[in-house]
Image (cartoon, rainbow, N blue to C red):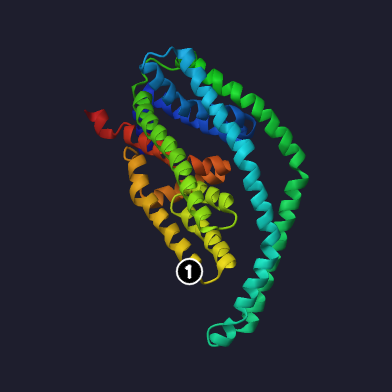
Amino acid sequence: MQFLTQWFRRHLSDSGVVFLALFLVIGFAVVIMMGDMLMPVLASAVIAYLLDGVVERLKSRGVPHIVAVSVVFCLFFLFVTVVIFGLVPIISRQGTQLFQQLPIMISKGQQVLMQLPDRYPDVITVVQLEEFTAVLSQRIAELGQTIVSVSLSSVVGVITILVYSVLMPMLVFFFMKDKQLIIDWALGFMPQDRKLAITVWRDVDLQVANYVRGKFIEIIVLWAICFVTFKLFGLEYAMLLSALVGLSVIIPYIGATVVTIPVLLIAWFQWGWGSDFIGLTVAYFIIQALDGNVLVPLLFSEVVNLHPIAIIVAILVFGGFWGFWGVFFAIPLATLVQAVISAWPKPVDQLE
């Protein structure tokens, strides 16, 4: 009890520590409790934060603030329009076609599996295969029911998308245009002694900006390279699979492993054990190797290295809280935790 008393007396006497602790607690509480309602605002703030780097570069070359904001916003709006009206329909159509082909693929896979007991009778039996195929069929049926239920609620989804498509561009524009006004307003609520908060913010600002912008570039580059490669080999569902490969980098270690399965399975169902399958497999693994050993070090050279265990724990924890966005920002949030721990006053600081 005396230890706790001394700890509270030592740390809570520092107004900077108290402010940082309250800010973190209130911030996490607001996101957890009101995250769904505030998602357009939070997402717009993140997008504006990422685009602000481009705005600042234009301003450093003498471009007026409002002109820089307008140019960056127009380019961003053009990019989003191309993605929504150009790429999303193709991915959606290929996803529907793939789902329609699943029964044929499953039947072909069952034929191959039923040959295994004859070849390896000591390893696998017919009964085990029948149980496996029954479970697999049940899971696919459940997936079909899920897709149907999602399609039935698509009207609500369309309305939500329409609302977001109007609100978010406005929010992004005003976040970029009035950034300094918002910062000055927020500083009015902070205590005079905010050295600790500034130290943490500078560290997190550098890491988050580098990470998210680098991750966005990595997604686009990997998506484009995989699409060109799949198209050259004539692989079906090239846009859908390349999009999955690109988005898989959001989840370090796990994403690349998981997305490899559908890529190789679809290639095998299309070509079998032929030269095309082997060539595509080799090309795909070369792309993954170049991504991990060339592109990632180039894009994330200034990002703090976190232990793989810390990354996986961050993905599980923050993904459980906020779903997709929690997974996407798992590493920046883990970096925030690391920055707070590093900047937090130690007993030695108090003695000095």
Q: Position of residue 281 (x, y in %)?
A: 46, 63
Q: Amino acid at mark 1?
A: Ser
* Residue corresponding to mark 1: 275
Q: Position of residue 256 (x, y in %)?
A: 47, 54
Tell me which residue sits at (54%, 40%) in the image.
325
Q: Position of residue 57 (x, y in %)?
A: 38, 22
Tell me which residue sits at (70%, 33%) in the image.
160
Q: Quadrant of the C terminus?
A: top left
Tell me which residue sits at (42%, 25%) in the image.
53
In which image quadrant can residue 65 be found? top left
Q: Identify the element where label 1 is drawn.
A: helix
**Does 114 appear above or below 326?**
below
**Does 15 appear above or below 34?**
above
Q: Is residue 211 visible?
A: yes
Tell me which residue sits at (47%, 58%) in the image.
257
Q: Quadrant of the N terminus?
A: top left
